[in-house]
């Protein structure tokens, strides 16, 4: 007996739930093999309302995520790497379906992504000691510089290395206690859909990572103007978009980190200073004695 296969309905991951776009608009993705093209699924085309909903979810998750111990955040990130290891083949297929990279290259990207999460998981309980300091003062008090998370960080990912690039931006931001709203690759969005499925069953609390799919030119201005987004990490903006982001971010006093043609496989791309991009260094005094 013939039967039709059940077509997957991808959804975005916001606040720990899978949702369709507020607009109900979608755009198609196809599987490319040589010269053949085959429809695979419709991806949600997120709107500014979806972005605002995601920022609200991230803001609600922030206090609880910040209060967790650094060691616990490291355990949670390591668990995500474990889950990705178990779905290595599926993630590789999602990257390779575009036909832009080979299966071997896609598999290498997934493995590097897993290793990158493990690398940053090891920094969760160490970066404060390295980036913070005890400052000598000629007075009867202690003086400390302490790193603290900024809040909600907006991330706009590159189309190049869609999984590795996204995680290379996400993980350094959340490990210090920030929460994130990410607009994923416009041309290769499906690996992000799978990442959302992994996050939903991981130990990362709902709202810490929110993943949007859609068109960059429709959402980038809202990332810049939204008052509750405290920092932006943007890969491969056009010159016009970079100027617009700079103007909008200045109005709401955002920290902006621009990446021009990042090579996510480059030696040294993962480092302590990726964490420093979105922390605040606060100085405090404590009296000595009674």
Image (spheres, helix red, strand yellow):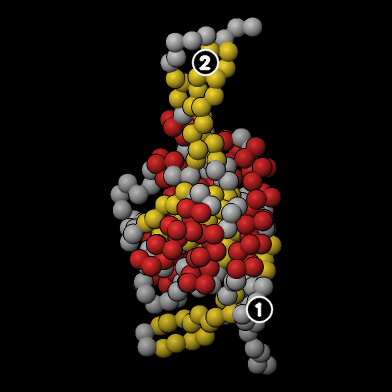
The quadrant the C terminus occupies is: top right
Q: Secondary structure at mark 2?
A: strand
Please tell me in which quadrant of the rendered image residue 259 appears. bottom left
Q: Is residue 239 visible?
A: yes
- Between the C-alphas of marks 2 and 1, the distance is 56 Å
Number of callouts: 2
Task: Bin the neighbour count of mark 2 within 10 Å (Cα to Cα): few under 14, some 14-19, many 20 and up.
Answer: some
Crowding around mark 1 (Cα neighbors within 10 Å: few <14, some 14 to 19, many 20+) is few
Q: Would you identify the image quadrant in which residue 27 lies?
A: bottom right
Front-lying residue, 263 or 76: 263
Q: Which of 54 and 191 lies nearest the eye of the viewer?
A: 54
**Residue 245 position (above or below residue 3):** above
Among the two numbered marks 2 and 1 on one chain, the one whose residue lies closer to the N terminus: 1
The reply, left or right, for residue 218 in relation to residue 241 is: right
Query: Closer to the camera: disc 2 or disc 1?
Result: 2
- At which x and y percent is residue 222? 55, 64
Residue furthest to the left in view is 267
Can you identify the residue that label 1 sits on?
Answer: 24
Whether the residues at callouts 2 and 1 have beta carbons within 8 Å, the answer is no
**Under tag 1, what secondary structure?**
loop
Q: In front here: 81 or 143? A: 143
**Picture coordinates of residue 258 (x, y %)?**
39, 55
Going 63% across and 84% down the picture, which residue do you hit? 5
Q: Residue furthest top?
A: 290
Q: What label sits on residue 142 in the rendered view?
A: 2
Labelled disc at residue 56: none
Q: Locate the N terminus and report the quarter of the image it occupies.
A: bottom right
Residue at image x 30%, y 49%?
A: 267
The x and y percentages for residue 19 are 67, 69
For residue 9, above or below residue 115: below
The residue shown at (48%, 44%) is 278
């Amino acid at each position: 007996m013939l039967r039709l296969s059940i077509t997957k309905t991808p959804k975005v991951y916001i606040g720990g739930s899978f949702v369709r776009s507020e607009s109900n608009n979608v755009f198609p993705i196809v599987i490319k093999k040589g010269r053949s093209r085959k429809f695979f699924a419709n991806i949600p085309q997120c709107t500014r309302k979806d972005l605002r909903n995601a920022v609200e979810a991230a803001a609600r998750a922030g206090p609880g995520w910040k209060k967790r111990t650094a060691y616990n955040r490291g355990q949670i990130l390591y668990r995500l790497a474990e889950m990705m290891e178990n779905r290595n083949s599926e993630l590789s297929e999602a990257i390779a379906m575009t036909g832009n990279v080979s299966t071997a290259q896609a598999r290498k990207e997934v493995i590097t992504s897993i290793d990158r999460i493990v690398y940053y998981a090891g920094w969760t309980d160490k970066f404060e000691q390295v980036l913070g300091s005890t400052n000598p003062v000629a007075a009867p008090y202690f003086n400390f510089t302490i790193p603290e998370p900024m809040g909600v960080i907006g991330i706009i990912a590159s189309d190049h290395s869609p999984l590795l690039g996204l995680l290379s931006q996400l993980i350094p931001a959340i490990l210090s206690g920030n929460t994130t709203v990410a607009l994923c690759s416009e041309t290769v969005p499906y690996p992000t859909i799978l990442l959302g499925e992994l996050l939903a069953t991981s130990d990362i609390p709902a709202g810490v990572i929110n993943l949007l799919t859609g068109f960059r030119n429709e959402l980038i201005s809202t990332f810049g103007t939204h008052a509750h987004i405290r920092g932006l990490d943007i890969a491969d903006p056009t010159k016009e978009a970079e100027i617009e982001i700079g103007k909008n971010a200045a109005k709401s006093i955002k920290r902006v980190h621009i990446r021009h043609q990042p090579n996510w496989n480059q030696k040294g791309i993962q480092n302590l200073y990726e964490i420093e991009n979105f922390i605040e260094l606060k100085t405090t005094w404590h009296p000595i004695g009674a």
